[in-house]
Structure formats: C-alpha cells, structure tokens
Image (spheres, rainbow, N blue to C red):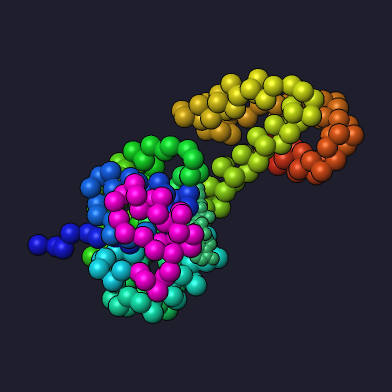
Amino acid sequence: MAKPLKIVLLGAGNVGFHLGKKLNEVGVEIVQIFSRKKTNAKRLAKIVGSDFTKNITEISTKANLYIIAVPDNAIPKVAASLSEIIPSSKLVVHTSGATPSTILSPYFKSFGIFYPLQTFSIDREIDFDNIPICVDSNLKKHRILLEQLGKRISKNVHLINDKERAILHVAAVLVNNFSNNLFTIGEKITKKEKLPFDILKPLIQETVLKIENHSPHDMQTGPAKRGDKKTIERHLKYLKKNFPEFVELYEVMTNSIYSNFRK
Ligand SMILES: NC(=O)c1ccc[n+]([C@@H]2O[C@H](COP(=O)([O-])OP(=O)(O)OC[C@H]3O[C@@H](n4cnc5c(N)ncnc54)[C@H](OP(=O)(O)O)[C@@H]3O)[C@@H](O)[C@H]2O)c1
C-alpha cells in the first residue's frame, strides 16, 4: 500500500494559505508550514494543526511531498536551501504558472507542478471545487499522485506540461490581471469625480456572465467596435485633461479592438 501523503508547505501567502486550508479540510496531513515571518507560519499552522517554522534549516524531513508556494523569483533560492535539508529523492513541486518545473531539477530527482489556475487573495474565501488544478511531474508515478491529490480538492484537474502552462499563464495574466487593473482605473476615475464605483459593478458582472455561453469576441461592444470616432475623441480629451497617464492605454486598447474586428 502507498504511504499516506504528508505535506510540508513552504509559503503561507495568498496561495499557501488557501491551499493549506483546503488540503487540511479534505483530510490531507500537513506536517509543517514554513513562512519567513513566524506570525504568518503560525497563523496557518494553527488552522491546519501542524508544526511551523520560519527557518528553512528546520524543515521537517518527514514529509513525502514539499509544496513551494513563494513568489516566483524566490523559488530557486528556497529550492536550493530546501535541497540542503531533505533527501534529493523527495517529491518537490511549486505552484507557479509562469515558472518551468525544471527550475527544480538542479536540486531534486522528482519535481513537479501543482498550479491552481485562479486568483487568490489571503483575505478572500475561495471555493476550490472548480478551480483548474494544473499538475505535472518528471515521473509518471508522481504525475498520477499529483492528479489524485488535485482531485481531492477540485473537480477540475489537468495534466499540463511546462510549455502549455507558460502559454496559459500569458492568457491568465491578460484576462485577470489586466482586467482587474482596468477595474482599478475605473475606480480611480469614479473616485475623482465623486461618482459611486458600485454603479459600474452590474456592467462588470455582465461582462463576465456573458462569456459563459458566448465567445468574448462575439460579445464585444463599445465605441471602438462600432467605429464611433467622435466618442473616442471625447474620451481621449477627458483623459488627456484629467488622467494623462491612461491616454496611451486607452489608445492601445482601442487599436487592439479595431484590429480584432478588421475585416
Ligand atoms: N496569488 C495568486 O493569485 C496565485 C495564483 C496561482 C499561482 N500563484 C503562484 O503561487 C506562488 C505564491 O504566490 P502568492 O501570491 O501566494 O505569493 P505571496 O502571497 O507573496 O507568498 C508569500 C509567501 O512566500 C514567502 N516569501 C516571500 N518572499 C520570499 C523569499 N524571498 N524567500 C522565501 N520566502 C518568501 C512569504 O513569507 P512571509 O510573508 O512570511 O515573509 C509567504 O510565506 C507564486 O509562484 C505565484 O506565481 C499565485
């Protein structure tokens, strides 16, 4: 019989926090949480009933899966420090969409990915049920193990290789990070003009609901799609006067819509 899974989670930020909580909820044993700040490690450890540490040199060797959920640029450093503590045969994965799994290959014989394709913020509850969990590993037996683990927390588990995941991440940044930045700009504009941002929320919601059953291309509306040049000029005039920093963005987005509808 396969050994029961025991996990060490390195990172108690947006992803680490929610992933740790969910894994614990479904009965997966988390033996230890690592975070640089003791308070962060302790907060999650208290919820999942595990040990915790702020020193990577004190990482437990008792786990059979190590999940690294730290910012992308810190992954190599954390992996290097971890490799000095645990045997190189242990399975180590990271949760990054943009980072190849092979970044772990100099340090470990078995490595992989456990990437939840969703936006996580520590203070916002999240339902894992339909979150796409993208998994991969250099070893088939670990691909299976990670798929099985994914299925314990979500109905939406995919085997996705490094190349596919990197491409998905480009699209994810465009649809999520960039849209959210546009919402932020909308909020800035309404705030300056003392208008309620809430008045835009049904529009934002409908934008997303519409594409549930339609291609976003087919759902595009607005002056750029219609070719309403006068309206665009008025918008640019307002922005030049009040928010010159957003003029270029407005022009780039307008041109992008033009080119998507060029016959
Ligand atoms: N946030 C998302 O929506 C999302 C979604 C999918 C995948 N991901 C991926 O998941 C990973 C974690 O993202 P996140 O948003 O959870 O990041 P985060 O909230 O910034 O993660 C912070 C965690 O990493 C630790 N940390 C920060 N810098 C470190 C360093 N230089 N060395 C060691 N530990 C460090 C923090 O420790 P202290 O806070 O205690 O200092 C904390 O435990 C990233 O690879 C990211 O690409 C993120």
Above or below, comparing residue 43 to residue 187 in the picture: below
Above or below, comparing residue 201 to residue 184 in the picture: above
Residue 177 lies, in percent from the top left, at: 59, 45
Q: In which quarter of the image is residue 254?
A: top right
Taking the spot 35% from the left edge, 53% from the top edge, the residue there is 45
Decide which of 212, 149 is in the foreground and name it.
149
Residue 68 lies, in percent from the top left, at: 41, 62
Q: In which quarter of the image is the C terminus?
A: top right
Quick check: is 39 in the magenta stretch? yes
Taking the spot 70% from the left edge, 26% from the top edge, the residue there is 222
- Drawn side of residue 174 relative to residue 125, left or right: right
Decide which of 180, 259 is in the foreground and name it.
180
Taking the spot 25% from the left edge, 68% from the top edge, the residue there is 62
Residue 122 lies, in percent from the top left, at: 48, 44
Q: In which quarter of the image is the N terminus?
A: bottom left
User: For the magenta stretch, what is the residue range?
Assistant: 34-59
Q: In which quarter of the image is residue 91?
A: bottom left
Decide which of 46, 195 is in the foreground and name it.
46
- Drawn side of residue 9 relative to residue 28, left or right: right
Decide which of 93, 237 is in the foreground and name it.
93
Does residue 129 appear anywhere in the picture?
yes
Picture mark count: 0
Residue 12 lies, in percent from the top left, at: 44, 54
Quick check: is 242 in the magenta stretch? no
Taking the spot 43% from the left edge, 69% from the top edge, the residue there is 55
Above or below, comparing residue 71 to residue 173 in the picture: below
